[in-house]
Every structure is written in structure tokens, then in C-alpha cells.
Image: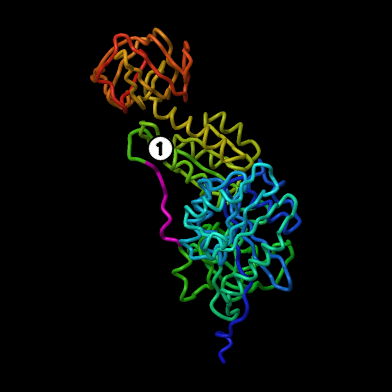
């Protein structure tokens, strides 16, 4: 028999998926008796990590995927790498948006699903409600007439974790997962970054074949020679077989997360480039924000870009573009500042340091550098930056709101439901009403109507003023009977 075709048992690759804060990393921590979550800023897993354990003389490889919605692309790639998806749902919170997204990724990857209902020890837990919600997503667990294994666990109290591992082994045996260690090399990149001391570090899981020190490999169109291999416990190893998570040293450039690693010259070389990836720059408008993005890893870099794209596509009535001058991993350097100055841009850093003296250079050249440690901070502040870019060419706006709903009272008065997007609205403000965003108007465009704010309501209370990012009800005198959703109110 050809040794290249000899198949052996391959440890299952298991991806942990679910909504943020539902306890995915806590379950792995309890299984591995480590404290990965405590080492993450804000308690949120922000990178994909891979870990291998032994249970009942069988190995299991875990991929821990981030829960925040900004990491959907990373979760999708984690799903593609997995044989089994453990869908974690908190017993006290039930099915949430990222739970549904994880289900979609698992189905798209054709991975087998095991449900882990976590936090069953909490007072507010409702296991039957969770199962009912899962059923509405067509995830039918065994006691609801389906064939999906469901284990009720508590990561905090380490309850039923052995049952979860037993379920993983049982499903793995049913799938008859096998691989050929002497076949063509194929690995999937689950993380990549540029380390200041070591250089480019690439984490991958070997799917087929064997990866060895000295091999010439390629990924993302980049050729590399493997200088060293490190396992998930930090030990140097000479080779990595199927399902083994390993960190590779040898790339000179950072390959893309989710791309395939193959041997140089392999017939599978075309698989090593993800041609579906595209640079997102938003809408084609005259208002452009030029950005340099530096992140600690390729995975988080991708997540940041995805978040920025989301802000662009959901900008509240304001159209603008993002131009990526540079997106890369590593610390913020003087060359980044010079590039930002030449491109009239700003620098955004995510979990990265600023090199010595760079801050002073940026100050001298009037270049803005913003750094963040969580995705939430970045999304919030960049939204403000984009909003500022959209109105930078206009006079300072005293107050501007978009009409989101109309209420007609029995008295025939009209209450205009608005969201304040710039400045504030105050009683007795003189206002203009436009049929589109005033920032898009020319100097010759006239308002549809002029009036005065006579009353403001926030929820049920009368108020004197309503500030930015708040919704309110506006009563005008004289009122404008033809006001409609999508119009704009601006203070003048």
C-alpha cells in the first residue's frame, strides 16, 4: 500500500462558538485548568487561540473563537477549520445575535454541532427556554426530537465538563475522522502577527500531511522556510502532524488569517491565496477619511477593518469614504507618521505600542494618533471621527436631527420623533426643515420650512434641551404638516 494513502485516526478539531460573555473561554479554561480569559483585556477573547488536550487517551484540538460581533470573519474561518462546533449558550441569556451567526457559520462549514448550555448554576437560568429558542433556529437537541447532543454545564463550578468531552469523542468516533500524515501538506492559519523580537509568527492547525522544520511552504502567495515550530505549550518541536496546533517562525511577511499553508510548488498552491478578500473603502464620495491601521495581529487587524466598514455603511444619512493608506501589524513607527502626513490621514492603533519619539514627531507634523485596547472604544471613537470628517467642510452646526417617526395627536398637533446627530436641540431654537441631510446641500438649496421649537419631549418628560445621540419628540410652532420620516431638522 502507498504510504501516502495510509489513513490514521486524526484528533477532532473543535471550535467553541457563541455570543459574547456566554462563557466560551471559561469552559476551555476549566477544561485546561488555565486562565486564558484573565489574561485578556476586559475579559474578552480578542484573538483565535488553538489548544490540544488529552482525554481518555485521545487528543482533542480546540479553537477558541472570539465572541464580539466585530470578529465575525475570524469566527467564520474558525468554523471552516473545525470538524465539530461546540455552540455555547448561556442558560440565563438564551440565544443572542452572535449565537445565530455562529449557527450560520457552523452550517456553512458543514461541521457537526454540539450544544453546551453554560451557567446552569445561575438563579436566572432557564434551560427549557434556551432549547425552545434553539429549536426556533432549527437546532433540535435530542430531548426535543432532534439528533444534536446537548450538555448542560457550569464552567464556574466545573459541572459536566467530562460529559462534554465524552460527547466530543463520541461525535468524533461517529464521524470517523481520519487523515494521511504522508499526504500533501495542508494547514489553516488561525492567527498571524509580527513580533518585534522574533519577527513574523504564524499559528496554524495542520489538516493533512506533516509540517516539518526546514520545509519550504507558502501561504497568501508568500514563500517561507520553516525555521522553528512551537506547540501550544510553548515547546519547540521538529514536526507537526494532522490536527496539531503549531506556531511557525520563518515567514518574512504576515500572511492572512484563514488562508491555507501548503508546500512550495504543491499542486494545492492556488489554495494558499484567498482571492475573495477585498479592501473596503466605503462609498464613493467627496468626503474621505484617510486612515492607517496598525494592529497587534492579522486577525484583529481584519476585525478593525470590518468595524470601520460597518460604520461607513450604516452612517446615519451622511455619506463618506474611508481610504486605507496602510493596514499592517506591529507598532506605530515614524514611517507611519510620515505616510499619514503625506496622505492627510490619521493613525489608529489597536493593542499596539507607539515606538519611541514617534509621538513627538506626530505632534510636530500635526498627525493624529489614536490607540485602543478594546474594539468597543475603537468603534465609538472612530464613529465620532468619521462624523467629524463628514462635517469638516461645513460651518459648526448648532443642532441637527433626523426625523425617524411622526406622531399625529388627537388635537391635530404633530410631534416629530427625531434623533439628534449633531449639537443639540433647545426650546425656542429657530430651525429649518430639509428633505435630505443638510451636509449634502448646496448653498443655493432652500429649506422646505422654517419654524421654532416650542416643546421637547424625552420619553414622557418635557425637557429644555436634547443633546447628541439622543431621541426626542419635537413640537414646532408653526407646525409643518408635510413633515415625513427621513427629513432633517437643523438649528440656524
Q: Local crowd at mark 1 within 10 Å, few (<14), some, or many (≥20)?
A: few
Instruction: Give the vertical position of 84 relative to 461 (above or below).
Output: below
Q: Nearer the viewer, residue 116 or 390?
A: 116
In screen coordinates, is 11 left or right of 77? right
Residue 75 appears left or right of 243: left
* Number of marks in the rendered image: 1
Q: Is residue 221 magenta?
A: no
Task: Identify the residue shown where x is 52% and y is 43%.
Answer: 293
Q: Is the image coloured rainbow, by chain, by secondary structure, or in one colour? A: rainbow
- Residue in view at x 53 percent, y 32 percent: 368
Q: Which residue is mark 1?
A: 314
Main secondary structure found in the magenta portion: loop
Q: At 67% from the left edge and 43% from the top edge, which residue is drawn?
A: 43
Which residue in the rendered view is the most extreme toward the bottom?
1
Instruction: Give the quadrant of the C terminus.
Output: top left
Between 261 and 488, the one lying in front of the other is 488
Percent position of residue 102, x then y: 52, 54
Quarter of the image with the N terminus is: bottom right
Image: 110 above or below 41: below
Residue name at image x 52 percent, y 32 percent: 367
Q: What's the magenta region?
A: 274-282
Residue 479 position in % (x across, y down):
29, 12
Q: For residue 84, what is the image quadrant?
A: bottom right
Q: Where is residue 334 shown, x and y percent of the image?
A: 57, 40
Decide whether residue 279 is among the magenta residues: yes
Above or below for 316 versus 36: above
Left or right of 311? Residue 337 is: right
Looking at the rendered structure, the secondary structure element under dot 1 is loop
The picture places residue 154, in percent across and down from the top left corner, at 70, 52
Amino acid at each position: 500500500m502507498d504510504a501516502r494513502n495510509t489513513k490514521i485516526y486524526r484528533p477532532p478539531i473543535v471550535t467553541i462558538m457563541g455570543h459574547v460573555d456566554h462563557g466560551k473561554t471559561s469552559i476551555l479554561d476549566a477544561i485546561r485548568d488555565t486562565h486564558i480569559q484573565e489574561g485578556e483585556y476586559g475579559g474578552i477573547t480578542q484573538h483565535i487561540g488553538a489548544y490540544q488536550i488529552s482525554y481518555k487517551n485521545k487528543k482533542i484540538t480546540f479553537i477558541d473563537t472570539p465572541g464580539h460581533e466585530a470578529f465575525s470573519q475570524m469566527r467564520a474561518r474558525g468554523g471552516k477549520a473545525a470538524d465539530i462546533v461546540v455552540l455555547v449558550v448561556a442558560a440565563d441569556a438564551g440565544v443572542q445575535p452572535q449565537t445565530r451567526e455562529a449557527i450560520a457559520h457552523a452550517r456553512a462549514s458543514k461541521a457537526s454541532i454540539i450544544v453546551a448550555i453554560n451557567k446552569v448554576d445561575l438563579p436566572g437560568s432557564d434551560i427549557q427556554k434556551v432549547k425552545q429558542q434553539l429549536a426556533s433556529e432549527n437546532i433540535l437537541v435530542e430531548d426535543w426530537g432532534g439528533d444534536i447532543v446537548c450538555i448542560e454545564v457550569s464552567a464556574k463550578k466545573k459541572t459536566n465538563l467530562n460529559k462534554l468531552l465524552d460527547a466530543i469523542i463520541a461525535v468524533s468516533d461517529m464521524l470517523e475522522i481520519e487523515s494521511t500524515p504522508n499526504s500533501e501538506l495542508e494547514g489553516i492559519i488561525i492567527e498571524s502577527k509580527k513580533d518585534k523580537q522574533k519577527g513574523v509568527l504564524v499559528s496554524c492547525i495542520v489538516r493533512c500531511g506533516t509540517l516539518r522544520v526546514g520545509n519550504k511552504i507558502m501561504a497568501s502567495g508568500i514563500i517561507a522556510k520553516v525555521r522553528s515550530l512551537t506547540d501550544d505549550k510553548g515547546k519547540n518541536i521538529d514536526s507537526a502532524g494532522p490536527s496539531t496546533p503549531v506556531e511557525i517562525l520563518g515567514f518574512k511577511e504576515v500572511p492572512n488569517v484563514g488562508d491555507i499553508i501548503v508546500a512550495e510548488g504543491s499542486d494545492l498552491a492556488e489554495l494558499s491565496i484567498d482571492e475573495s478578500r477585498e479592501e473596503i473603502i466605503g462609498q464613493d464620495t467627496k468626503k474621505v477619511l484617510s486612515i492607517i491601521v496598525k494592529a497587534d495581529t492579522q486577525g484583529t487587524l481584519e476585525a478593525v477593518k470590518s468595524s470601520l466598514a460597518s460604520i461607513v455603511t450604516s452612517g446615519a444619512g451622511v455619506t463618506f469614504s474611508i481610504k486605507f493608506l496602510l493596514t499592517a501589524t506591529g507598532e506605530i513607527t515614524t514611517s507611519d507618521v510620515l505616510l499619514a502626513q503625506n496622505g492627510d490621514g490619521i493613525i489608529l492603533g489597536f493593542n499596539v505600542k507607539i515606538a519611541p519619539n514617534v509621538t513627538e514627531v506626530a505632534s510636530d507634523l500635526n498627525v493624529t494618533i489614536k490607540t485602543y485596547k478594546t474594539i468597543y472604544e475603537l468603534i465609538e471613537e472612530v464613529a465620532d471621527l468619521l462624523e467629524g470628517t463628514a462635517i469638516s467642510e461645513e460651518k459648526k452646526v448648532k443642532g441637527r436631527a433626523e426625523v425617524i417617526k411622526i406622531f399625529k395627536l388627537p388635537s391635530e398637533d404633530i410631534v416629530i420623533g427625531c434623533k439628534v446627530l449633531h449639537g443639540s436641540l433647545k426650546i425656542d431654537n429657530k430651525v429649518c426643515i430639509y428633505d435630505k441631510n443638510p451636509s449634502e446641500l448646496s448653498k443655493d438649496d432652500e429649506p422646505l420650512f422654517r419654524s421654532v421649537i416650542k416643546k421637547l419631549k424625552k420619553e414622557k418628560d418635557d425637557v429644555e434641551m436634547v443633546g447628541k445621540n439622543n431621541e426626542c419628540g419635537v413640537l414646532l410652532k408653526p407646525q409643518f404638516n408635510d413633515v415625513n420620516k427621513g427629513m432633517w431638522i437643523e438649528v440656524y
